[in-house]
């Protein structure tokens, strides 16, 4: 018995398989890998040449110039990347772009809101109530409703009828 056949017999006995069946299985596996490699790499196929047919040549239309899109980004973006995007510019920016003069703010008493805390620019505690962007607060003394527009790290902005008020943490 040659050294190769004795090594093969030892390997098959350690694996507990019949040497002839194991050899057949190995041969089939090698053939399958070879066919797969031939299919993937395969012989190079010649490129097909297309004959050009002479005919009238039409000038391509000039591409339309895309309009510029302007975005107004938040100073401190919100912490939720899955929140719907809102690209509406503040009223002052829209008026400036339209060439309209800014409307003077009516002289009114500032709202009586007390900002106690903010959390990651996403939540704020205003007058003892935990709020987030888009929540509505009602001023107790006047009954005016204010919408929370922005919550920063140390401030919150409220809006009512186009009037924007920024309240900050004390200290």
Image (cartoon, grey):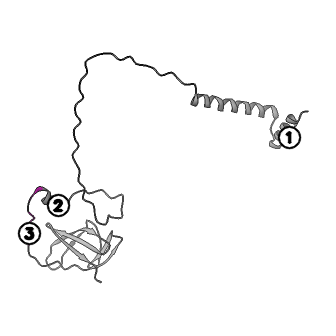
Could you say which is closer to the camera, residue 51 or residue 6? 51
Residue under pointer 2 = 93
Q: Are the residues at dot 3 and dot 2 in contact (C-beta closer than 8 Å)?
A: no
Residue under pointer 1 = 10
Q: What SS does tag 1 mark?
A: helix
* Residue 55 rendering spot, x and y as whole percentages: 28, 16
Closer to the camera: disc 1 or disc 2? 2
Q: Which residues are magenta?
A: 98-106
Could you say which is closer to the camera, residue 20 or residue 153? 153
Q: Is residue 102 magenta?
A: yes
User: Secondary structure of the magenta portion, mostly?
Assistant: loop
Mark 1 surroundings: few (<14), some (14-19) or many (≥20) residues within 10 A: few
Task: Tell me which residue sits at (20%, 59%) in the image.
Answer: 89
Q: What SS does tag 3 mark?
A: loop
Task: Tell me which residue sits at (22%, 78%) in the image.
Answer: 113
Residue under pointer 3 = 104
Nearest to N terminus: mark 1 or mark 2: 1
Task: Tell me which residue sits at (10%, 71%) in the image.
Answer: 105
Q: Are the residues at dot 3 and dot 1 in contact (C-beta closer than 8 Å)?
A: no
* Residue 100 rendering spot, x and y as whole percentages: 8, 59
Task: Tell me which residue sits at (24%, 23%) in the image.
Answer: 58
Nearest to N terminus: mark 3 or mark 2: 2
In the visual, does 132 lie left or right of 102? right
- The answer to which quarter of the image holds residue 164 is bottom left
In the visual, does 94 lie left or right of 58? left
Identify the disc placed on residue 117.
none
Q: Is residue 58 magenta?
A: no
Could you give the CA–CA distance between mark 1 and mark 2, rounded to whole angstroms? Answer: 84 Å
In the visual, does 87 lie left or right of 38? left
Could you give the CA–CA distance between mark 3 and mark 2, rounded to whole angstroms? Answer: 14 Å
């Amino acid at each position: 018995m040659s050294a190769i056949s004795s090594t093969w017999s030892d390997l098959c006995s350690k694996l507990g398989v019949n040497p002839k069946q194991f050899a057949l299985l190995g041969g089939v596996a090698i053939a399958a890998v070879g066919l797969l490699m031939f299919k993937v790499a395969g012989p190079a196929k010649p490129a097909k040449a297309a004959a050009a047919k002479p005919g009238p040549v039409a000038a391509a239309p000039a591409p339309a110039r895309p309009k510029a899109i302007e975005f107004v980004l938040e100073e401190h973006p919100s912490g939720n990347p899955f929140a719907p995007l809102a690209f509406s510019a503040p009223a002052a920016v829209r008026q400036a772009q339209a060439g309209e003069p800014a409307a003077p703010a009516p002289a009114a008493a500032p709202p009586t809101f007390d900002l106690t805390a903010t959390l990651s620019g996403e939540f704020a505690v205003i007058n003892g109530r935990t709020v987030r962007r888009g929540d509505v607060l009602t001023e107790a003394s006047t009954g005016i409703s204010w919408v929370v527009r922005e919550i920063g790290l140390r401030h919150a902005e409220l809006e009512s009828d186009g009037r924007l008020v920024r309240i900050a943490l004390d200290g």
